[in-house]
Image (cartoon, rainbow, N blue to C red):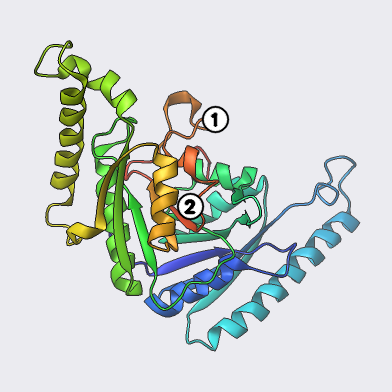
Amino acid sequence: MSAANRALAIIDPTVTEQPALERARWFARKTGAALELFICEYDQYLAGERFFDSASLTRARKSLMSSHERRLNKLAEDICEDGIDVSVDAQWDHPLHDGIVRKVLRSKPDMVFKDTHYHTAIKRSLFSNTDWNLIRNCPTPLWLVKPAEIGEQISIIAAVDPVHERDKPAELDHRILAVAKRLRDQLHGRLSVLHAFDPSPAYAVSADSMAFPISAPMNEMMEALKNKHKQAVAELMQGQGVAAEDIHVVEGDTRELLIALAEQVDANLVIMGAVSRGILRRLVLGSTAERVLDHVPCDLLIVKPSDFETDVDA
């Protein structure tokens, strides 16, 4: 992937704190990317849906959108002091997640920043319906921001699956690594790569293709599976410029191991791939992301395959 030249920050007009804006501003300052601030608004009581539309409702909608534009311009003035090229936009659209995707399709940013919420008491993120729908349908890399600071050096984890036991396109691993390395270099950070595998389903999937009878000792079976995964990761990482000590091929539950590694390396960002499957695209998130997004204690960046097509009309 080329360097990110344009970033889009989703502004929540209902709150004061804007973690996504702060992360996008930090990103633009570090990388030189242009930044656009976007508010997507809709109010059913001003839409004229329950009652007849009227001139007064039109004026109310116009007043509300003008208020958002003033707020965005004020934020932009402050950001300009950092020497960042910044623009603003406010649109009346719904549902929110589709309105954001339509904005992405029009503006074609290289990165989208949106905040999500993290409840430290129960160590669980509170992903909204909007977040999940953006994960499914946003065609551009989606950086979901949790309210935590990033120090001088960002720590990044790229989660890959070169054995493709979850039906993930092979090309997606390369896209994940390309994004991860670009961010590592642009942000002067450190990159760790994780491939976690559960031997139970791997054994079930791989048994028929084994080169020895099914009655072979279980330890030999497991050793063959481990070697299969290690070899796949070694081939994927060849020439990628990641130190051997930063490549982790581990056996066990993906969610638990990803969380453990995030804590071990004090991760600020986990990069994962997400794909959708068949006609149930809007209902099923086809990726390990579905199992870990609510639990990792840091930001998440969701990457889609190059041939991904959103369900949302521009």
Q: Which residue is mark 1?
A: 283
| Of marks 2 and 1, the one in the foreground | 1
Which residue is painted at 59% across and 51% down in the image? Answer: 123
Q: In what element is the residue under mark 2? A: helix
Residue type, mark 2 in image: Leu
- The image quadrant that residue 167 belongs to is top left
Q: At which x and y percent is residue 311?
A: 50, 37
From what the image shows, is residue 308 above or below residue 263? above
Q: In what element is the residue under mark 1? A: loop
From what the image shows, is residue 10 above or below residue 132? below
Mark 2 or mark 1, earlier in chain? 2
- The crowding category of the residue bearing disc 2, from other C-alpha atoms within 10 Å (few below 14, some 14 to 19, many at least 20), is some
Q: Is residue 302 visible in this depiction of the protein?
A: no
Say whether residue 40 is left or right of residue 53.
left
Say whether residue 52 is left or right of residue 147.
right
How far apart, in angstroms, are the residues tagged by discs 2 and 1? 21 Å
Q: Nearer the viewer, residue 250 or 95?
A: 250
Q: Which residue is mark 2?
A: 105
Q: At which x and y percent is residue 63?
A: 81, 66
Q: Nearer the viewer, residue 209 or 29?
A: 209
Q: At which x and y percent is residue 130?
A: 62, 46
Say whether residue 56 is left or right of residue 167.
right
- The crowding category of the residue bearing disc 1, from other C-alpha atoms within 10 Å (few below 14, some 14 to 19, many at least 20), is few
Locate the N terminus and report the quarter of the image it occupies. bottom left
Which residue is painted at 48% across and 38% down in the image? Answer: 291
Do the numbered discs 2 and 1 sit on residues whose CB atoms are within 8 Å? no
From what the image shows, is residue 165 above or below residue 41? above
Which numbered circle lies on residue 227? none
